[in-house]
Amino acid sequence: MTFPTPNLAALAPLIILVAAAIVVLIADLMIRAKRALGWLSLIAVLGALAALLFLRPAAPEMQTMALADGLGRLASFGILIAAGLAILLAFDRVTDFTTHTGGYYALLLVATAGMVVLAEASDFLTLFLGLEILSLALYIMVGLYRRDLRSGEASLKYFLLGAFATGFLLYGIALIYGASGTTNLVALAQAIAPLSVPLPFAPLLPIGVGLLLVGLGFKVALVPFHMWTPDVYQGAPTPVTAFMSVGTKLAAFVALIRVLASLTSYERPWLLALAVLAALSMTLGNLAALRQSSLKRMLAYSSIAHAGYVLIGLAASNPAGTQGALYYLLAYTFMNLGAFGAVLAMQRPDLNDVTMEEITGLSARRPALAAIMTIFMFSLAGIPPLAGFFGKLYVFKGAVDAGLAWLAAIGAINSAIAAVYYLRVTVAMYMSGTPAQPTRVTPISWPLWTVLAIAAVATVALGLWQFPWLQSISMAVAAIAR
Amino acid sequence: MNPNIPLLSVITFLPLAGALVVLVLPGARLQKWWALIISLATFLISCLLLVWWKNGAAGMQFMERQPWIPQFNIQYLMGVDGLSLFLVLLTTLLTVLVLLFSWEGIEHRLKSYLFLMLLLEAGMIGVFLALDLVLFYVFWELTLVPMYFLIGGWGGPRRVYAAIKFFIYTMAASALMLIAILVLYLNGGTFDLLALQAQRLAPNLQLWLFIAFGLAFAVKVPLFPFHTWLPDAHVEAPTGGSVILAGVLLKMGTYGFLRFCLTLFPDATRRAVPWVAALAIIGIIYGALVALSQRDVKSLVAYSSVAHLGFVVLGLFALNAQGIAGATLQMVNHGLSTGALFLLVGMLYNRRHTRILDDYGGLWKQVPLFGSLFILVALSSAGLPGLNGFVGEFNILLGAFQANKVFAIFGTFGIVLGAWYLLAAVRQMLHGPLTNAENAEIPDLRWREVLTLAPIVVLFFVIGLFPNLFLDKINPSAQAVVDALQTPPAVTQESTLYVQESTLYVMALDRLP
């Protein structure tokens, strides 16, 4: 394997992120004003974002290990935005849950770097590398809430199950390598191209893909690899949950899109499996979410269902479906991060969760917060003209185009089921009286307001003004559909 | 003449803009005036449609076409024809009247109430004007949100249950419509309703799509047995919500049948006639019988809606010009008379805080103005000749008679029952001696309340005495629907199955070594 001279301009976002993580760690030892660490991390993320948008060569940079193409740029954009918002979420609340302020920011930057690597990987080795970087950082971050026993439990659970899933992933990679003789996605696509020499071990390929699917399915929380999700999402500090729920999904789904795209010329027995997994994830996720009284747990189950919706676009395996999945992921980044941000705003400083009873009558105490939460809930439920609706519309369109109308119908019926629990939140906020003992109103700091405002505006704007987004999405998809 | 202003966009988005402004206005008085002025302006602007109307034209007028999401071929396509014209006017008028009615009585969260009302108005107008299927679906679902909050925020004791039931029923039923819209796109390559109407789908596919669309509309109408959300929603909703719900929202269902099912799936429609007509007739008789046994006057009016909307559906599925034109006019009539009934019940409720029929009796002596208006509205609803209800019902029955005599005969039963339960309510409330001492203190209607009802009463007579003012504009469009229904399938499009097979074939070719 040859290592080409790295293109520093293309790697700049990663370099900035990792360098900043180290600087933050060192600065943590030396300075007292911990807010400065937040600022430092925020500036690093903005710098990475600027490098991504302006330093990157316009033409896709083909490297053996990573691809700085339109898809990578789009995914990295979403990941960096999520990271920036997660930093703002923690700005004034990080001391609520941990004394390791520097650790939080440094790990967040490392996890972000891992996600970017994962989303841009064009080789199974880089894919694995990215996944491990982000996972290891997240395992620790999940356990940062010292006073909450559930946080430690969540961390351990996530770590053990995650290590297990990584094993599956690695085994899958090994089998694919055995079948095709390469770990590179581009070379893999060429090896199984119609006119190439037949592969002697081709039957290993579906098994390898299946195992790979287990590994990535674990990260994006698909049924039946979802068992960890509710506990981890509930136990992790809320800013961490907000970040990991959107960032990991975005990166891992993009990696999955790349892997599946490189296998297009194979007969693909796994497409039906994807469709079934999508149907299961949506249905079970939504049904389980109906019964939750903890908002974080409810959103955890809802995120399982949303992974199912995104998977519809992948199961469709056509440009419309892939575009739909990407649009969905982008929309989900804003609406779900916003929803967790709102949960954080409702949360008492000494608690790590919010129950339905606590938000009873919230609209009277906090009209703006309740209104913003309502936007996120309706967007997650898929009510037009918000972003969540169009995400569903596009993945359904991909499915219908692919002859999977039944899957789209299951998805559509599921959105009606899901509406019940999203509505429960609005009922509690708007249509129930004030609770017996008035809860203390935690002041909402400006960084938190900023996050909520950005997420809410994006959720509305992605729905009403889609042209530029869809333009870059369709360009990204056109580039991978070789 | 057609002026160079995007009239339809102005009518749709003026309320929306007004709604957003309400949120930042200080003071209840200012907010109320602002909402009223915005809705009044919307109504007056919508009257320009009549001024600039091209008489005798069957097709869409005032059309606007802009690309909205070009990547997915979704357009901003709006247009109005004889079938939607009066529904738009009904919407803009009823919104004004509801805001006038709500001048007093909304004590808490007035700003939100006004915001939701104006948002709802924008959504409803959009439903009647949108000609792109995705745009239509966006408006269709958008109306759910404000109505959900209106019922849940300002409703009666069981408001939360009613609000959620309303929301989930409608959303679940329209979920499959979204998939059907996508299947239509797969076959026709466009979301443009007019372009899709020009195509003829394979009969089997038509049937499936008819069911998917029809289910969404049947729940909205509501057609028996999908009506169970309606009594809950109507009874629990605040008066303003009930008026809009009965007056306009239910018409979205019948309008949907007319605009989408009949024109997109003509062959399936013909096959579905006996089934839908049977459900409509069951609805007419069942709704009337249940209304007869209600003790709560608001739920009496709610069940009467089931019966009246059954009539409208019966007229639509007569599939002739008379039936369709009658049904279109009857949609407006029902909006006016049931809207007025809910307003009157609301006015009485504001005075006595009860809606139980037995609590009343002999009110006429006490409140003569209320009494005479109530009788007038009840007679209009029952279809007295000379008033509006008669024109619509007569045309529907005429159309139904031409299509199928049995339908018409059963439909006539409904008229008799309708007169029965309405007059029974009138007798119970207004006639006889003033038995309940608590009723002796009720004041009569005030000028603001009379002003609220006056436009409706005037329209009762205008429609009743000069129906051709309206039918002249409706008829060409109704005739066009019938013509399209009767043309034999000239070029039958190949079924999707074939399309799928051919793509599979192409894919297989690709894979050959």
Image: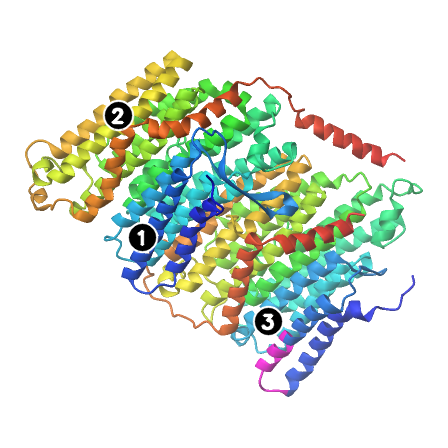
Position above or below: A353 against A386? below
- Magenta region: A31-42
Marks 2 and 3, how far apart in space? 67 Å
**In which quadrant of the rendered image does the C terminus of chain B lie?**
top right
The answer for which chain carries disc 1 is B
Q: Main SS type for the magenta part?
A: helix
The answer to whether the residue labelled 2 contacts the one labelled 3, judged by CB atoms less than 8 Å apart, is: no
Q: Mark 3 points at which residue?
A: A87
Of residue B375 and residue B66, the one placed in the foreground of this image is: B66
Q: Which residue lies furthest to the front in this view?
A: B1
Q: B93 or B307, which lies in front?
A: B93
Query: Would you place residue A361 above or below residue B250 in this image?
Result: below
Residue located at (39% from left, 42% from top): B48
Q: How far apart are marks 3 and 1 (CA)?
A: 45 Å
Pointer 3: residues within 10 angstroms few (<14), some, or many (20+)?
Answer: many
Residue A456, percent from left and from top: 52, 60
Please, what secondary structure does the residue beneath circle 3 have?
A: helix
Check if residue A324 falls in the magenta segment.
no
Asked if labels 1 and 2 share a chain, the reply is yes
B92 vs B332: above or below: below
* Mark positioned earlier in the residue sequence (1 or 2): 1
Identify the disc placed on residue B383: 2
The chain containing the residue under callout 2 comes to B
Q: For label 2, count other residues whose C-alpha is less than 10 Å away and answer few (under 14), some (14-19) or many (20+).
A: many
- Image side of residue A85 versus residue A478, left or right: left
Residue at 39% over, 65% down: A366
Residue B55: image quadrant is top left
Q: Nearer the viewer, mark 1 or mark 2?
A: 1
Is residue A223 in sight in this rendering?
Answer: no
Residue at which label 1 appears: B36
Left or right of B138 on screen, residue A11 = right
Please state which of the two labelled residues, at mark 2 or mark 3, is closer to the viewer: 2
